Amino acid sequence: MTDWIGETFTSDVGWTHLETLVDIGNRMAGSPGEREAMEATRDALDAVGARNARIDTFEIQGWERGDSAILAEDTTQECIALPRSPSETATGELVDLGYGLPEDFDRDLSGKVVVVSSTVPDHYDRFIHRREKYYYAVQAGAEAFIFANHVPGQLPPTGSVGTEEAPVGDIPAVGVSSEVGARLGRRFEGSEVTVEVMCETPMAESGNVHAELGPDTDEEVLVTSHLDAHDIAEGAMDNGAGTAMVVELARALAAREDELENRVRFVCFGAEEVGLVGSAYEASRLGDGRANVKAIVNNDGVVGGRTLQFHTSGFDALDDIVETVSDRFDIPISLLPEHLPHSDHWPFVVHGVPAYMIGSVSDDRGRGWGHTHADTIDKLESRTLREQAIFLTELVVEVAKSEHDVPHADPADIAAALEAEDKAAGMKVTGDWPF
């Protein structure tokens, strides 16, 4: 039966939920807007027929934005604070470290304010995450950290700092547009500048939204996303679209529930943007129950482009399953077997749980419009959401088939793979090394 394909291609459920999320406004972790998003997502999952829709709350380190500025000679340069920056003022000599590669920090930066790009050069063999650059600066003794967008258009980037053990960062951190970053390097390198960050850091509450379909089996497939977003934008692509996709998949799978051979549990995580807090909470809550998670199907960055991209973290069985669906529907995909330790699948993968991290192919380097004021719904198309929902519905049904054995990994093998992919050193710097 293929009626479900036509129903999915004409469904407006996912897109309507995306509109609901972006119209909330601020969905920052721990904010009233995040709570509103949790409640709306719980209700949407219930409305499409998923069972036991509920919210599981937990406490987090909150962060509330105040004013920020860079004072350079007689000018004030526009910036925004990076979430979980401390509320501090720091002064020092400006040093432009260009791309901010690990070797660029191999010096004494005491008394310095560093500015780095949000990207890496074409020839570099891996992407250097913002937090990795930040903690290289901290280790080298820098007074403050300035993160400059590589995408032009007067768009300062956001993105959190901090670690699980120390959720508020060590030194003040701000994001600036590509244009401001270039100006700082051209006019003020070697001059004394001051970085001011004002914010509040109260304790707050976040939560994960759960619902389920299928038989009451011990083994389960988790279909996931995160519903929080940074406070400066709508968070349409990152990650309203992922949560809208989960709701659309729940609608389609409810119509195919008799085909599900394992339980499918939908989990929309809170507090992803401040350190994968919601997914880490759920992975910890499950404890030994992680052994019953057959696979994670995590949606973070879907709908941004028409071709889906799958990171599979070295789980060969997941490669085979998604290629089967790709061949069945004659739909091309991008398949990347390496690890991507920056979304909600990751707290499970470190325990050996197989996982897809699903985004979409884009011509943009890095996040593109993501983590800026420009992450808005007008960049996305409902057609893409519907097309991808068809593919991903079939994928979930396929993963849930009892015939597919998806072995868990030894965490030691995950650690060895990260070493081989040259990702371990950076994770150790940021406090993200769990092995």
Image: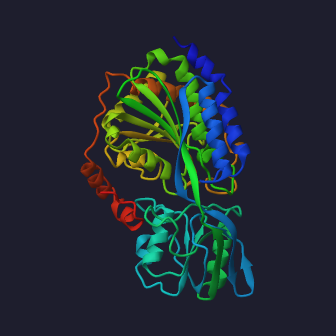
Q: Position of residue 55 (x, y in %)?
A: 56, 39
Where residue 132 sits, quadrant-wise, is: bottom left
The answer to whether residue 180 is left or right of residue 261 is right
Residue shown at 38%/41% (left/top)?
286
Q: Which is more toward the observer, 35 or 259? A: 35
Does 142 sit above or below residue 381? Answer: below
Q: Which is more toward the observer, 193 or 202? A: 202
Residue shown at 41%/31% (left/top)?
221
Q: Quadrant of the C terminus?
A: bottom left
Q: Position of residue 20 (x, y in %)?
A: 71, 38
What is the number of callouts on the image? 0
One can see residue 120 in this view: no
Q: Position of residue 410 (x, y in %)?
A: 25, 45
One can see residue 178 in this view: yes
The chosen color scheme is rainbow
The answer to whether residue 233 is left or right of residue 333 is right
Q: Residue furthest top?
A: 1
Does 41 sit above or below residue 97? Answer: above
The answer to whether residue 235 is left or right of residue 160 is right
Q: Position of residue 340 (x, y in %)?
A: 42, 50
